[in-house]
Image: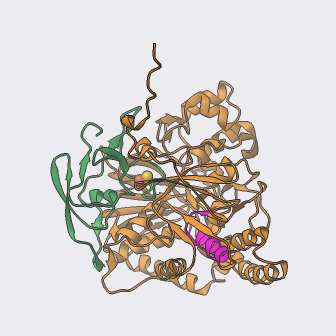
């Protein structure tokens, strides 16, 4: 069995969405040898995700995200960036050795600099029935429609908050599906307040207005300032009940409404996937407005750990366009810090990029405000609601662990197994920390789960590859 | 929940996968999770502790709810593309 080879580079970029893609391109243009690693087969991340080989729009019509994704994929293919698709990073050690596993085998890379651009995952605050088949994430619904060309169900209820609500509902209608209702945490007034910010990017505002027109034309009921209180069904979701809330997400006790559905798409905003800074013990700070715990970094994405840069929604929730800009800044900074860019050139390039960044702030601020976490939703979780899906841990068990002395999230994990399942706490982490914070006083006091390898679960068979016991050299037994 | 294939999307060649011994038709390029949903197969597994029924949830490789036995090994159905003759075992876990 050959020893695993460690391939040397100047920069490793993990995550090939708009941030990672831009970082890799900027650094390689400046002369760095860059490897770009992603779990998906093609660059694009979630937002610019490529349609898989075999699927295409029959009429060749591409939406703005698809065009941006195609441009990114073409730019990476034309660049000197080494592309490693379909590879899962499971370990990062030293400065920096990156171990990946894929169906093709294991590969390791080494570079003095690393850009973490791993994007975000969805926040879904638990409610009774959220574990039923047929209940899916809002972002998941987008993926089904954008990259699989499928509408999630015959009759879908769309719930949660933020622009994604309107996007998903409109896409379902356009795709020939039925939307039973939109259940929005925000009020009409919240949307009006967001309007000036959203209007700072006219193309996106226009797209949003078209979504709302489509929703209105289809006569979809829109329940503002409502949340899902339960999903019910025998072996899959069959009905969903909504109830009014206040601006904090607290149930106001108003009349409930129940809808018959076969699918529920729900999402309560995004949480930055800052696993790499967490694993490398880089300094983090809590920012509710930015989505949660985020790496502390300078304007260019330099983290507190030498040689580590963070960019995109994995560093702070802002959206695709700002992600491409923070990615580019990180790539430029890595090139500057490696000595590939002199300070004059770096100034010029980064100044232009920063000016572009400032123009995106109004829009992402408005979108972020619509998606902001509503703290009262955490308080309102019923005692017997499952919070940790992997381990089936209910709120009452979490409260019992807290009462038994778990004062921060790592202790809670040891007491209750919350966060020890295969999703590694990605689905429940934000909620669990919110529950602990109710007792600890703040999210800062509740802390965050210590990052540990493997970064992503990998089947042992992937790591072992073609390994066979008969390959182990057995020394000749010593003569008696 | 039965996912509906949208009109206006070109799909790969028809493929046949085998789910617990029964044939399920899908198209090249589709993810296994999407193909199962389109075939009205929504329950993928039971949760280990309480045995609650579960289906694909995040569709982006994060939640692990879609980890099922595919061609003999545990794989995430939302990340693996279907191929002709793929065998999927749900029995025993649902
Ligand atoms: S559906 Fe979440 S990992 Fe596949």
- Give me the chain that's orange: A
State the residue at coordinates (77%, 56%): A306
How far from the left and from the top, in percent, is residue A67?
Answer: 48, 83
* Among the 4 quarters of the image, the one containing residue A332: bottom right
State the residue at coordinates (39%, 75%): A219
Q: As drawn, which residue projects farthest toward the left?
A: B22
* Among the 4 quarters of the image, the one containing residue A261: bottom left
Q: Which residues are magenta?
A: A13-28
How far from the left and from the top, in percent, is residue A173?
Answer: 36, 74
Q: As drawn, which residue projects farthest toward the top?
A: A480
Q: Indicate whether B50 appears above or below A339.
A: above
Q: Is residue A265 magenta?
A: no
Q: Main secondary structure of the magenta part?
A: helix
Which of B34 and A184 lies nearest the eye of the viewer? B34
Q: Is residue A27 magenta?
A: yes
- Give me the chain that's green: B
How far from the left and from the top, in percent, is residue A209?
Answer: 52, 82
How far from the left and from the top, in percent, is residue A170?
Answer: 42, 74
Q: Indicate whether A343 appears above or below A428.
A: below
Q: Indicate whether A239 appears above or below A61.
A: above
Left or right: A480, with A284 as reference point: left
| Quarter that holds the N terminus of chain A | top left
Any part of residue B36 in sight: yes
Q: As drawn, which residue projects farthest toward the front?
A: A479
State the residue at coordinates (46%, 28%): A475
- Number of numbered callouts drawn: 0
């Amino acid at each position: 069995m050959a020893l695993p080879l460690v391939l040397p580079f100047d920069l490793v970029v993990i995550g090939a969405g708009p941030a990672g893609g831009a970082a890799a391109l900027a650094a390689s243009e400046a002369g760095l040898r860059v490897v770009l690693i992603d779990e998906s087969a093609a660059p694009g991340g979630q937002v610019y995700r490529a349609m898989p080989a075999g699927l295409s729009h029959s009429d060749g019509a591409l939406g703005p995200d698809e065009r941006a994704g195609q441009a990114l994929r073409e730019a990476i293919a034309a660049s000197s960036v080494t592309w490693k698709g379909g590879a899962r990073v499971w370990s990062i050690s030293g400065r920096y050795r990156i171990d990946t596993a894929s169906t093709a085998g294991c590969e390791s890379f080494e570079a003095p600099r690393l850009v973490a651009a791993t994007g975000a995952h969805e926040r879904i605050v638990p409610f009774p029935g959220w574990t039923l088949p047929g209940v899916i994430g809002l972002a998941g619904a987008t993926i089904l429609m954008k990259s699989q060309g499928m509408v999630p169900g015959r009759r879908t209820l769309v719930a949660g908050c933020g622009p994604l609500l309107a996007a998903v509902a409109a896409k379902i209608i356009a795709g020939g599906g039925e939307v039973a209702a939109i259940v929005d945490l925000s009020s009409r007034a919240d949307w009006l307040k967001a309007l000036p910010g959203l209007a700072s990017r006219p193309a996106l505002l226009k797209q949003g207005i078209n979504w709302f027109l489509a929703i209105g034309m289809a006569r979809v009921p829109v329940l503002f300032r409502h949340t899902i209180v339960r999903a019910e069904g025998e072996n899959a979701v069959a009905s969903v009940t909504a109830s009014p809330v206040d601006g904090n997400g607290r149930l106001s006790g108003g009349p409930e409404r129940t809808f018959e559905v076969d699918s529920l798409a729900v999402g309560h905003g995004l949480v930055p996937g800052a696993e790499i800074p967490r694993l490398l013990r880089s300094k983090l700070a809590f920012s509710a407005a930015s989505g949660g715990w985020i790496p502390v970094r300078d304007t260019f994405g330099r983290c507190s750990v030498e040689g580590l840069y963070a960019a995109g929604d994995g560093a702070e929730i802002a959206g695709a366009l700002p992600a491409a800009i923070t990615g580019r800044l990180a790539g430029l900074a890595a090139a500057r810090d490696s000595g590939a860019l002199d300070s004059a050139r770096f100034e010029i390039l980064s100044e232009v990029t920063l000016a572009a960044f400032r123009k995106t702030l109004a829009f992402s601020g408005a979108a972020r405000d619509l998606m902001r976490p509503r703290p009262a939703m955490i308080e309102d979780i019923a005692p017997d609601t499952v919070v940790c899906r992997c381990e089936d841990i209910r709120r009452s068990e979490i409260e019992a662990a807290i009462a038994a002395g778990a004062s921060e999230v790592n202790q809670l994990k040891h007491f209750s197994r919350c966060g020890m399942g295969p999703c590694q706490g990605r689905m429940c982490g934000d909620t669990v920390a919110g529950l602990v914070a109710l007792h600890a006083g703040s999210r800062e006091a509740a802390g965050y789960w210590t990052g540990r390898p493997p970064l992503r679960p990998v089947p042992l068979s992937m790591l072992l590859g073609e390994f066979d016991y008969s390959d182990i050299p057995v020394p000749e037994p010593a003569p008696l | 929940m039965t996912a509906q294939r949208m009109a206006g999307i070109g799909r790969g060649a028809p493929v046949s996968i085998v789910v617990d011994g029964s044939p399920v038709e899908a198209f090249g390029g589709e993810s296994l999770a999407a193909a199962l949903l389109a075939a009205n197969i929504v329950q993928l597994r039971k949760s280990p502790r309480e045995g609650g029924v579960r289906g694909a949830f995040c569709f982006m490789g994060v939640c692990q709810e879609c980890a099922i036995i595919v061609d003999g090994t545990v794989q995430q159905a939302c990340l693996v593309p279907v191929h002709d003759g793929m065998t999927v075992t749900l029995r025993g876990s649902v």
